[in-house]
Image: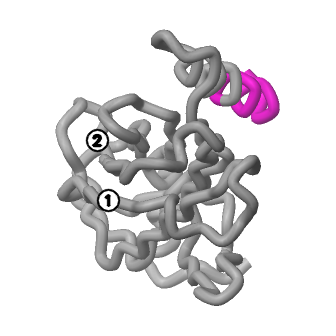
Amino acid sequence: MSRSDKIGEVESNVTRLSHLGTSTASMQLACSLLADAAEVNPPSGRYFVFNGGVETITCLGLPSVIPNLAYVGKIRILPDERGVVHHAQLRCLRPNGELLLPPLESDFDPRVSVSPPDRPVYHLLVVNYRMVQIHEHGEHRFTLACNGQELGSVSFFADPMPHDQAQRMATGGVHE
């Protein structure tokens, strides 16, 4: 499956999940990505991403430590959902389904938005993690939910370092 197929799969998943229930439309995950680090510019709500697009992390051995890992998610809230406080939940799961990191939960209030009431508003969630310990190889997945409904996910794969590369590192011969 190509990268574009994976992106299309996630987008169709988000669309399918966003139309559950009695409403014809509900909030959606506008985007989510992983990076080495991310920072928000509070006045504008824009964000900076450093080394974005983390999809694979190569581990010399296990357990392994990722020095920096950032999650960026942006939730699109439709006009009819702006009148109440919402509850977001971010979870990071290991390949075996157990939590890799403690879940993060936060409430946000779209009623404070200054944009016209007939427009969607966005809630930006940026979390920077330090010294994340990886216990096994495979797919690790961040899932974002709002009010108990999963909006979507993004994942990275922890892969073993190729044997020849690991041997070169062990002997100090990394130079090419």
Residue 3: quadrant of the picture: top right
Query: Is residue 64 or residue 4 the one in the foreground?
Result: 4
Give the residue displayed 38% in from the left and 29% down from the top: 149
Q: Secondary structure at mark 2?
A: loop
In front: mark 2 or mark 1? 1
User: Looking at the magenta stretch, what is its main secondary structure?
Assistant: helix
Residue 67: quadrant of the picture: bottom left
What stretch of residues is rendered in magenta?
Answer: 1-10
Give the residue displayed 59% in from the left and 82% down from the top: 40
**Dot 2, how many residues are within 10 Å of its Cα: few (below 14), some (14-19), or many (20+)?**
many
Give the residue displayed 39% in from the left and 43% down from the top: 140
Q: Position of residue 7 (x, y in %)?
A: 72, 33
Q: Secondary structure at mark 1?
A: strand
Mark nearer the N terminus (2 vs 1):
2
Give the quarter of the figure containing the C terminus: bottom right
Asked if residue 148 shows in the view, the reply is yes
Left or right: 163, with 27 as reference point: left
**Cα distance between the residues tagged 2 and 1:** 25 Å
Residue type at mark 2 is Arg
Q: Which residue is mark 2?
A: 94
In reply to whether residue 99 is colored magenta, the answer given is no
Q: Which residue is mark 1?
A: 107
Q: Position of residue 13 (x, y in %)?
A: 60, 21
Q: Position of residue 127 (x, y in %)?
A: 42, 70
Residue type at mark 1 is Asp
